Amino acid sequence: MASAHDRAVLQAIFNPSSPFGSSSGLVIEEESHDNDSGFDAGLLEQVKELESQGVSAAEAGDLPAALQRFSQAIGILPRRASAYNNRAQALRLQGDTAGALEDLDRAISLSGGRGRTACQGLVQRGLLRRLAGQDAEAREDFEKAAELGSEFARQQAVALNPYAALCNKMLSEVINKLRNPSI
């Protein structure tokens, strides 16, 4: 089995646009799950059904119904992160960026920065921050989401990091010279 350093070198060779030290393209990541073990099973089932109904309503374009379902889920289990993350997406679609950011902050906090909900919340908050011109804060969110397994977040973090872009360019030039010594 290759060491972390070996995987990083291989990643740099086969994917020169990725930051050196990143081996996410070569490692199969485990799917990240939320820890729902601390919640009553009956209430959890009810909340998941409400969230499912909310997602279906949002997909059908009925944002008020979606918001109602997500808020009901939050009312039943206010310490569970997922419904806040889902409600944030509906709020964002309605144009309520401030409300979406508030719910994303809550979802990330409740999740402890771990699991699928944290990853999704960090990506969404990073996108909203990037749209608001808060690139440093967006990059932090993308870097945290990348650590949780989001390839999209990793790409966004690299795009927002001017030093990584410069290092990638230099590394790419070195690799090209090694591949084509006559140039």
Image (tube, rainbow, N blue to C red):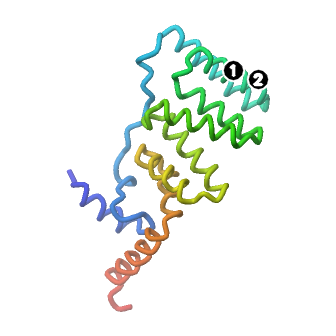
Of residues 100 and 156, which is closer to you in this image? 100
Foreground pick, 29 / 82: 82
Q: Residue at x 31, y 81 (%)?
A: 178
| Residue 130 image offset from top left, x and y in percent | 62, 56
In the rendered image, the quadrant that contains the C terminus is bottom left
Q: Do the residues labelled 1 and 2 touch (CB within 8 Å)?
A: yes
Q: Residue furthest bottom?
A: 182
Distance (Cα) linking label 1 and label 2: 6 Å
Can you give x and y, in whole percent of width and height, for residue 7 in the image?
Answer: 28, 58
- Taking 163 as reference, is 31 above or below it? above
Q: In this view, does 108 lie to the left or right of 93?
A: left
Q: In which quarter of the image is residue 166?
A: bottom left
Say few, some or many: other residues with alpha carbon within 10 Å of mark 2 (under 14 / 14 to 19 / 20 or more).
some
- Residue occupying the point 79% across, 28% down: 62
Say what secondary structure mark 2 lies in.
Answer: helix
Q: From the viewer's perspective, tell me whether residue 115 is left or right of residue 11.
A: right
Residue 88, which numbered label?
A: none
Q: According to the image, label 2 marks what residue?
A: 65
Label of residue 69 in the image: 1
Q: In this rendering, is residue 155 above or below 40?
A: below
Q: Quick one: SS at disc 1?
A: helix
Taking the spot 58% from the left edge, 12% from the top edge, the residue there is: 46
Instruction: Give the amino acid at mark 1.
Output: Arg
Q: How crowded is mark 1: few (under 14 residues within 10 Å), some or many (20 or more)?
A: many
Q: Position of residue 115 (x, y in %)?
A: 44, 34
Q: Which amino acid does label 2 sit on?
A: Ala
Comparing 48 with 81, the one in front is: 81
